[in-house]
Image: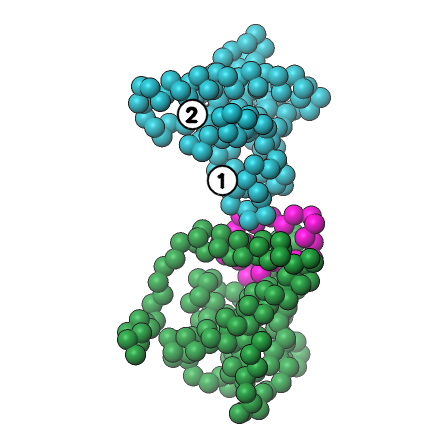
Chain colours: A cyan, B green
Amino acid sequence: MMTMLGGEPFLLVSKQEQQNYPLYIRSVPSDSELKFHYTVHTSLDVVEEKVSAVGKVIVDQRELYLGLLYPTEDYKVYGYVTNSKVKFVIVVDSSNTSLRDNEIRSMFRKLHNSFTDVMCNPFYNPGDPIQSKVFDSMVSSMMVQTC
Amino acid sequence: MSRQSNRTTESKKMNSELFTLTYGALVTQLCKDYENDEEVNKQLDKMGYNIGVRLIEDFLARSSVGRCHDFRETADVIAKVAFKMYLGITPSVTNWSPAGDEFSLILENNPLVDFVELPDNHSNLVYSNILCGVLRGALEMVQMAVDVRFAQDTLRGDNVTEIRMKFVKRIEENLPAGDE
């Protein structure tokens, strides 16, 4: 799972339905990371719910973007699930109005593309935490843009 | 003889991800099988050599390139015909030594290393070393002993990938080709 926090964007990618362990977590500022761990893990339940709902009402199967998972007082949490059940979560400050649905959607697409590149690196073992510098810099640039 | 009909000058297309991932799988497996990077580099070179000594026949049959008169011509053929044919890229030939026996192939992008990021514990690995072996093997079959090595590599943070080739000697005819 993967997360990002924006305003402070925070991202996290996770793998597998049963064991949601984080593949990548990033937040700005980094000191609030623990809090977002909590937020993100909570959001995974909502992801689960949405995914199983999608299965029932056969919606467009290729729509990976789950939209706003839930708003809290301070943050908005967005989710995205690939067909291989890797979950991407982005948390943004609710006061941040520059990020609309469309922007979030394109951020997820960019993340997904970068994630695909990471997976294609022969030295990366699927399931390991992501340590790629390229991925890091992509995420950083995305966070800078949104701040 | 039936294969003869397949030997055309136009190249068949191959999915580049499949190619890159195949090579990646090969290198990472070697890294698992051998203790250190030097050994992996050696194995890659050896594999490349074995490819090269075969590939040269295919190359000569398909490209209808004649005998080269000097090393400069060889360099041009390698860069403009061979690399184009097999990897779909055209490296530039530069940095000739004054004596004209050494040059560099500059690869702007190397199809072998798409997606690849070298982990820190493989700092000595020359990921694309197979290319050196291929060049060495191929040229050996046309009576040229060359020394090939990577001088720069984008995987190590350089801007371009540079393969340095040095002419060593002409191999006298009728020597049995060494099979490694």
* Image quarter hosting the N terminus of chain B: bottom left
Q: Quadrant of residue A33?
A: top right
- In magenta, the rendered stretch is B107-128
Mark 2 belongs to chain: A
Tell me if label 2 and label 1 are in contact, CB under 8 Å. Answer: no
Is residue B118 depicted above or below B129 in this figure? above
Q: Position of residue A120 (x, y in %)?
A: 51, 45
Dot 2 corresponds to which residue? Answer: A65
Is residue A7 depicted above or below B179 in this figure? above
Q: What residue appears at the point 46 percent right and 71 percent down from the top-left corner?
A: B82
Q: Quadrant of residue A6?
A: top right
Which of marks 1 and 2 precedes in the sequence? 2
Q: What residue appears at the point 28 percent right and 75 percent down from the top-left corner?
A: B2
Is residue B17 depicted above or below B150 in this figure? above
Horizontal placement of B123 versus B175: left or right? right
Main SS of the magenta part reads loop
Is residue A118 depicted above or below A19 in this figure? below
Mark 1 belongs to chain: A
* Image quarter hosting the C terminus of chain B: bottom right
Q: Position of residue A42 (x, y in %)?
A: 56, 15
Dot 1 corresponds to which residue? Answer: A116
Q: What residue appears at the point 50 percent right and 76 percent down from the top-left corner?
A: B53
Query: Visible in this render: residue A8?
Result: yes
Amino acid residing under circle 1: Thr
